[in-house]
Image (tube, rainbow, N blue to C red):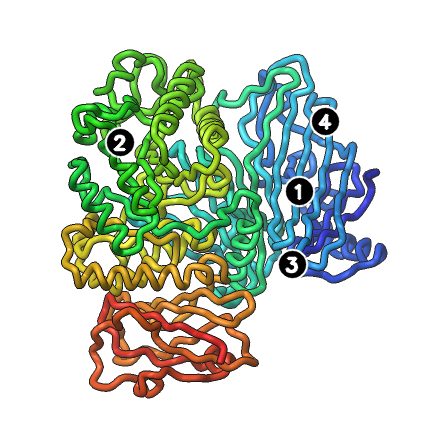
Amino acid sequence: MTPSVIVHLRRAGTSLVLDARGPGLPRVVHWGADLGQLSTADLSGLVDATVAPVVPSSFDEPTMLSLLPEGSAGWSGRPGLAGHRDGRDWSTAFRLVGLDVIDPPSDDGPGARAARVTVRAADPGAELSLTIEITLDPAGVLTLRHRLRNDGDGRYELRELTPVLPVPAVATELLDLTGRWCREREPQRHPWPMGAWVREGRHGRTGHDATLLLVAGTPGFGFGHGEVWAVHTAWSGDHVTVAERRPTGEATLGGGELLAPGEIVLGPGEEYATPLLYAVRSADGLDGLSHALHTHLRARPGHPRTPRPVTLNVWEAVYFDHDLDRLRALADRAAEVGVERFVLDDGWFRGRRHDLAGLGDWWVDEQVWPGGLQPLVDHVRGHGMQFGLWVEPEMVNPDSDLFRAHPDWVLQAPGRLPPSWRHQQVLDLAHPDAYAYLRDRLDAVLSGHDGIAYLKWDHNRDLTEAGHGGRPGVHGQTVAVYRLLDELRARHPGLEIESCSSGGARVDLEILRHTDRVWASDCNDALERLTVQRWTGLLLPPELIGTHIGPERSHTTHRVHDLGFRAVTALFGHHGIEWDIAAIDASTRAELAAWVALHKRLRPLLHGGRVVRVDHPDPAVQAHGVVAHDRSRAVYAVSRVATSVAQVPGAVRLPGLDPTRRYLVRPPAGVPEPALLELAPPGWLASGAGVTLPGSVLGTVGLHLPALHPEQALLWEVTAA
């Protein structure tokens, strides 16, 4: 398409309007609510209406914020592009040379297709070319990617290339996430002042403290109300996500890769592509963002289509104490309670009796497994369960045969090793021989056993001083990891891989293009997990988040919780167990089996419905649920996370139901209800038959809670009457 046009894309209640009339890069006139069908005259008027005035002590022409902010256009905030050619070509003035728009008709129904815009621009003086790829998909999710090519004869060092989008002035609050090991996804929010709120991840992985979404919104926005805009940087290495508000009136959200000095140097004709920046907005609060993102992810060709198997991981049952008879007995009990996938964790390979040695030596330890792993694999499969295996391929212990033979295969600065972390270093996967070794060893393990269907792929340290060939190596390492994952899955069709990284330190939408689920946290404490899962779910649908029932006494916090609280918390995800269930009594196993059966019955709803979270005024009450897309049924969980100031907390509203339909609400059959503090139950529960009410009443008035103790939870199953 010839330049000099105004582009209007519409999908799922969102409009994107681009002023591409040139001569410079297009600017985003509007990213927000659907504007409806606009005529050419309307679009031209809209563009004129959004041009700022010229004010005193400013440029003589209005400043235009383009898809790539440039100083040559008067932008004085964070640069969209930073780089140089031996100190030259440090500033750019790109000019539009081509524009392609593919905007098929869409009614947002089944079969709807994405709209795409490709912008081509060049700066002959700086000898650079820029391509900007924009997609607005049927769920209303916007993605941006920049591609920069060096057209000159000399080398061009790139320091930053960051896509950004403008946000309207009504967005005055920010929310993002932080965290640490075993307490990932901790929300924080504050007013959006002038200046830049910059979230940089320098871990060489996504990070426990990564903000999955950086959200800007109208004052007081919540899960079910307020207009919100958000971005996600889809990259598993060093990255930046930024919100910036300028005194000149502009406000932007953006993100990209965080590059070290000298990490990306483009030779003649070479190109660099940014990570995808995901951007989404909603008029219905944070749940609206989640709905769009979950819909987008579920539409991916590679999204899991089969029921997510209930998984038992043996780590918190046996740790490094691998014994075939003990593991067979554990598999017997797993099959008894309904487990569908059995995962052998750390400790199966040579020299791995503790975490001080063995990483890198990916052969089955003959001393521990004299008959190999196949007898256990066969026993597990004989019960009709899948077999999975833990690996940590990117790491190496200095106490390993691999490191002793190839110390040069470690990411490092010249002349020294990085500080040790968990007694391990990081293999340099950009080194061809190291890459080939890992690929071939993992391939041999998978090919040498009949029936390994799943890898729990761990990554237990940050990348520090991660050098390759004397230069920064995080970018090359990240790209190589993606390639290794893809190559193994191509060699072993049907193999599923979990992204685990000390729990939840590698959770992003790019790693999920190469894997099948994430492990949200190494903490299985149900109280901690409520927050971890609630906010991981801001980005990911439940079926992509591993949620396991841990032991009665938590491995990481030593808190003690009853089975009901642990089971309700773990129900809303890719369900599993991390517990020595061979050591529990028969009645407890029977209760556990009932919870597993309930999950399987609810699994189509949990893994296909719309996630809703309750904005409850009492911070001691946390409630959330999943509603079928036809709103015929739903399930809600209500948890007491602490004591309340009020003796009786306020009623809990049930969002997402059809206000015109009547619903029966009652506890699910087949699982025990918690032991309560009350002398008498709320009136609606007194008969034991539940209550039938219109969705309008349930959504606006709600239902009173029974008198739950702190750290107890209950379920309400809702069906259209």
Q: Amino acid at mark 3?
A: Ala
- Label 4: few (<14), some or many (≥20) within 10 Å? some
Which numbered disc flags the more N-terminal residue, 4 or 1? Answer: 4
- How far, Cα to Cα, is label 4 from label 2? 59 Å
Q: Nearer the viewer, residue 410 or 391?
A: 391
Give the residue at mark 1: 134
Question: Which quarter of the figure has residue 132?
Answer: top right
Mark 3: secondary structure: loop
Identify the mark at residue 12; answer none if there is no mark: 3
Give the residue at mark 2: 373
Question: Which quarter of the figure has residue 355?
Answer: top left
Q: Nearer the viewer, mark 4 or mark 2?
A: 2
Answer left or right for 60 relative to 426.
Answer: right
Q: Amino acid at mark 4?
A: Asp
Which numbered disc flags the more N-terminal residue, 1 or 3? Answer: 3
- Label 2: few (<14), some or many (≥20) within 10 Å? many
Q: Is residue 246 in view from this perspective? A: no
Can you give x and y, in whole percent of width and height, for residue 658 in the image? 54, 75
Q: Nearer the viewer, residue 365 or 417?
A: 365
Give the residue at mark 4: 123
Q: Is residue 454 above or below residue 657?
A: above
Identify the mark at residue 388; answer none if there is no mark: none
Can you give x and y, in whole percent of width and height, for residue 546 in the image? 36, 49
Mark 4: secondary structure: strand
